[in-house]
Structure formats: C-alpha cells, structure tokens
Amino acid sequence: QVQLQESGPGLVKPSQTLSLTCTVSGGSISSGSYYWSWIRQPAGKGLEWIGRIYTSGSTNYNPSLKSRVTISVDTSKNQFSLKLSSVTAADTAVYYCARDPGTTVRSWFDPWGQGTLVTVSS
Amino acid sequence: QSVLTQPPSVSAAPGQKVTISCSGSSSNIGNNYVSWYQQLPGTAPKLLIYDNNKRPSGIPDRFSGSKSGTSATLGITGLQTGDEADYYCGTWDSSLSAGPYVFGTGTKVTVL
C-alpha cells in the first residue's frame, strides 16, 4: 500500500524558507488520478490545509499562504515538495503530506505521512 | 479561524453513542462533500469518512457520516476507550476568503 514520509530541516530561522519533501513509496506518484497535499498543525491547534499539486503540475493553494507557498512534484524521484518563504514563529507546526484521491472540488486525504515538526526560531 | 464549527468536546460512557456536528454554510458544506478524520494522541490524522457517508476499507461500521443542508454529522456507536481522540471534518469552500479546502475546529472525544 502507498506510504508517505516527510523529510526536511526541523529548525528554520525567521525570514528564511522552509523546505520539506514528501517521499511516496509503495506506488508511483504518477499513477492514478491523485492530488498530493500539504497540511499543517500548530501544537495544540487544528489542521490547516496548505495546498496541493496534481501530477500534471497544476496547483491550488490556501489564499492565506498563497504569496509564500510553492508546491512542486518530481515524478522521477516519486516525491513532491513544499517551500514556504519568509517564515515566522507562526509557521511553527507539524507538517503533514497526504494523498488526495478526490477531484477538482472534492477532496479527502488518505493516507497521511507521519508528520514532521518544523520550528521557526533563531 | 475556521469556517467550519465543531463542538470543542463530547463525552460518553463505553458502549454509548456520540455525535459530532460540523456546521458550515452554502459555500462549503452546503454544496460540497464532507470528510471526517480521527487523530489519536501524538499521531497523524486518519480518514474515517469521505463523500459525506462512505467508509474506507478497514473502518468499522461503528463510524457513520451524514449531511443535511449546511451541516454534517459524525456518529460513533459502541464507544470504546480506543476512540478517545480528536475528530475533524473537512470540505471544499468556494468563498474567496477561505479554502479552497477547510477543516473544522476539531472535537475531542472523551470516553468516561
């Protein structure tokens, strides 16, 4: 079955760019009609959808983060990535990647990666 | 702040039933499919319900979902101690200020 694993620095300095990668195993990122999403969760708080990418490269982003977010896909490595620029302490959170088997305006997330904690601090 | 409102907490004794509401609007729940997620302490969320009322393979039928108008409901019957977790609803939102995808505020289920 498909599994997802996030990786990247656990500590990022304020004003710098947060970069995370999600590696997909157990299946090809290009097979099937899937979107690939990033979701985050500050400690003790709820879930926030960041954005998603289709294997064609088309993306959708959360309007509140759109100016700072870039999601890309590397099908040769079976990975997709998140870049969040100009980070502040408010971006400290556990970041999850997830597969979205839905359609253009219909989504659900399954499976999820285990999550990775990113702390923004000097 | 989330545009989908859930009660902060619900509780019941083992074997009982709980329901969790998710209240939205015509720009989200009213015109889109709802999914539900269970997040056990210290773990990643897990899909429980998609397309309002469908259960993925492996999810017991103790979990059910429904939608009416601009609200959705998750039901858990035969409550077990292992059901103690946070539960989130989610759906698409067509308003310019939110979304495209939004999660609910989350509900903590406590088994008494």
Image (cartoon, rainbow, N blue to C red):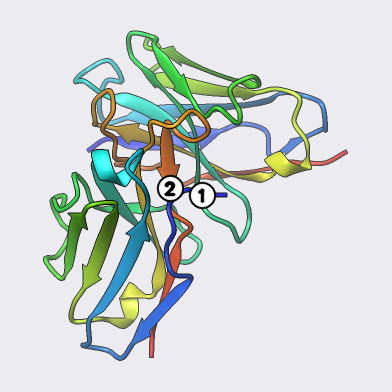
- Which residue is at a point 67% across and 33% down the rendered structure image? A9
Task: Give the x, y percent position of residue A119.
Answer: 72, 43
Question: Seen in the image, is B79 located left or right of residue A58?
Answer: left
Q: Which secondary structure lies at badge 1?
A: loop
**Circle 1 residue:** B2
Task: Give the x, y percent position of residue B99.
Answer: 45, 34
Task: Give the x, y percent position of residue A25.
Answer: 33, 30
Does label 2 lie on the same chain as label 1?
Answer: yes
**Chain identity of mark 2:** B
Q: Check if mark 1's residue and mark 2's residue have beta carbons within 8 Å.
A: yes
**Circle 2 residue:** B103
- Which residue is at a point 21% across and 47% down the rendered structure image? B50
**Chain identity of mark 1:** B
- Which residue is at a point 25% across and 81% down the rendered structure image? B79
Please say if B100 is above or below A91: above
Task: Name which quarter of the figure residue A33 lies in.
Answer: top left
Along the viewing direction, whichever of A72 and A29 lies nearer the viewer: A72
User: Mark 2 is on which residue type?
Assistant: Phe
Task: Give the x, y percent position of residue A23.
Answer: 43, 27
Question: Seen in the image, is A61 located left or right of residue B91?
Answer: right
Nearer the camera: disc 1 or disc 2? 1
Give whichever of discs 1 and 2 has the lower sequence position: 1
